[in-house]
Amino acid sequence: MADAATEQRSTRLRSRSVGLVGPVVGWLVVGLVIAATAAGFINRLLRPDEAPYLLLSREIPDHPIAVVAIVAVVAAGYILLFRWCCHRVAAWRDGVRAPVPATGSRRARLARFVDHVFGRWYRIAALLALVWLPFYLTSFPGQPSPDAANMFAEFLQRRSDFTGAGPFAPADQTAPYIDYPTSFYLLDNGQPGTDSMWSNHHPFFVMLGYGSLGWVSIQLFGSLMPAIVLISLASALFTLVAFGRALSLLGSLVPSWWHRGLALALTALSPLIALWSMAEHKNQWFCAAFVWWLALLAKRMHSDRPAGRRWYAETIAMSLIMALSVQFGWIVLVAQAAAMLFTRQRAAGVVAVGLPALLVFGTISLITASGTAIPSDPVETKGVQMQLLALTLREHPDALTATERDELSRIFDLDEMVEVFDPSNSDPVKSTGPLERKTFSFHYQTVQPEDWDVLNGIVVRLATEYPGTFADGLFLKSYRYLDPFDEGTDWYPPWSPRYEREVAGYRVAPVPVNATLRGGVRDVANACYGWFACRPIVSHGPRTIAVVLLLAAAIAVRRRYAWLWALPFALQLGIAGVSPLSAGGRYVLAFTYALGLVVLMLAISDRAGDRGASDADLPDRGDRLGDDPASPPHRTPSGSPGSY
């Protein structure tokens, strides 16, 4: 009896300990958001005018009372907001149903409209296209950024097929180690004659796709403009289809017309999604595939029926697009597949999520190992260490020993590194970025792989000796993503009217179509963004914080699958923190895209799919809206959205 009682007490203690994990994690996340937002206000209100950047180790001792007041006000606001999120998310545990509006009332008509739109995925896509039409008419087809222009240039000018005599041989062609990547030793150990290699600096298959379209466009039309228009059109159409499918899939699991309408409004009334959907970039492909993929996973996790061929086909396709479009895509997929091993959908996760990621990663590895392409420049993974080193040397010029200075001088021009340090962008210290802004901080033509061995040890030693400066550097690198009033560095699609570029003698930018209107829309948006009160309406920060707080609240109140949905967002936020930009909007673009989807996912009943659900309890078709009296079910032919 005593042993049984002891075992029961141990079980209760373990259960209580596990139950505390969620609230602790939730409040830790809130603490990070409070610290980041408070740092933003400290930077705007307390940083000396002559200081080039924020140093918390300077501002806190200089203004202790003001800092405490700022933190207290920010904390009070976020604590109230987080408690409200916890209350709402907990109330949705058993699913949500909107009150049945009176027949003939305005709300009844609105409910019928939402039900009608969610009845087919293409109605959702058509409605989004209609709402976003003013942006399409004024800004289409966008304009390639330097990244896209470099992908065109790499395909058309780097390979031996396009060098030498012929139309694709510009006299001023630059070698890839001067353009990108920037490590000379990656080019066959620095041997000459390898300048025609491709690279994986930007995603290899995106470069092949953009470059191939550009080559065909030149052959057929003598211009790159048709390819640019086609890329923008395909991106916009894919985004519309992705949101149509994603909202339809999740809407079939949420009987409340009000919550479905809210998710649709959060998506439709975000001009950033409409504008980014037309970009000739790479992140918007990932984000559109991401929302579709997230909805497919939610549909699978909340269903007790075997996954059908259609679900596998769609999920594998979206996983492949995610892995192909951005360098970190395969990381998100592998982590999610590993997390799904702890659920009852482990086989679906391995086949539809994990294997596509490994396929893309393995293919790229084989391509680079065979010498067909240069691997991603390792300097790109060392931006944080380099920024911390540059800041420490800027604030403490004598921090290095003579031996350390000699060792680091094989990698960097330390004086140049300190001079070009920019807290908002690590490109200057690693000599990357646009050629017109290229620095000589990094000895990319002479550095060798073994030279890097000393970097991490020296950075760790400096961190222990100057912990305040180390903390300053980490904050400068990452806090701005969670400050709703921060100005960011590239929140708008990269359509600079001053950017001019030709590749192989063919114009890439500026794009003449809609040039005046596109510039006017950009000017209006920038004017709004420059106004402190207007900025949260059009910036990524508030949407990023909203997703973070909603998912943290779901974890805190122990909502089912909350950890699973939070994982890909947490990974992307971490990747954003180590990205070259300190507040790059495109690195958190998925948060802006997915806010409406997150609301729908949290409105699904935790018990959905666990009861041998009937059609009324768990619709298995994307056109069935549940048994809510305000949401009459819709029967459609086989093959309708969500039929798996």
Image: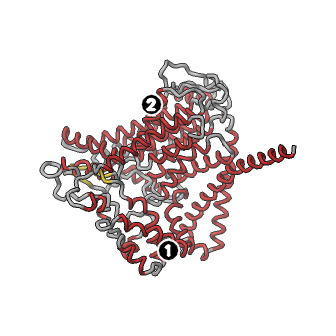
Furthest residue toward right: 1
The image shows residue 229 at horizontal and vertical percentages of 30, 41
Dot 2 crowding, Cα within 10 Å, few <14, some 14–19, many 20+: few
Question: Marks 2/1: CA distance?
Answer: 57 Å
- What residue is shown with label 2? 313
Quadrant where the image shows the N terminus: top right
| Residue 427 x %, y % | 38, 63
Give the answer, above or below, for where 587 lies relative to 463.
above
Say whether residue 350 is left or right of residue 619. left
Amino acid at dot 2: Ala
Above-or-below relation of 288 to 536:
above
Camera-side residue: 279 or 303?
303
Residue depicted at 35% across the width and 38% down the height? 233
- Residue 569 as seen in the image, left or right of residue 79: left
Residue drawn at point x = 55 percent, y = 36 percent = 346
Q: Position of residue 213 (x, y in %)?
A: 27, 41
**Dot 1 surroundings within 10 Å: few (below 14), some, or many (20 or more)?**
few
Q: Nearer the viewer, mark 2 or mark 1?
A: 2
Which residue is rendered at x = 67% and y = 38% of the image?
92
Residue 123 shown left or right of residue 377 in the figure: right
Element type where label 1 sits in the image: loop
- Give whichever of discs 2 and 1 has the lower sequence position: 1
Image position of 299 (left or right of 424): right
Q: Nearer the viewer, residue 271 or 542?
A: 542
Residue matched to label 1: 49
Find residue 601 and report its horizontal and vertical position in percent.
59, 38
- Along the viewing direction, whichever of 101 and 145 lies nearer the viewer: 145
Q: Does residue 468 show up?
A: yes
Please say if the residues under marks 2 and 1 sit with CB atoms less than 8 Å apart: no
Residue 592 in view (yes/no): no
**As shown in the figure, which amino acid type bears the numbered disc 1?**
Asp
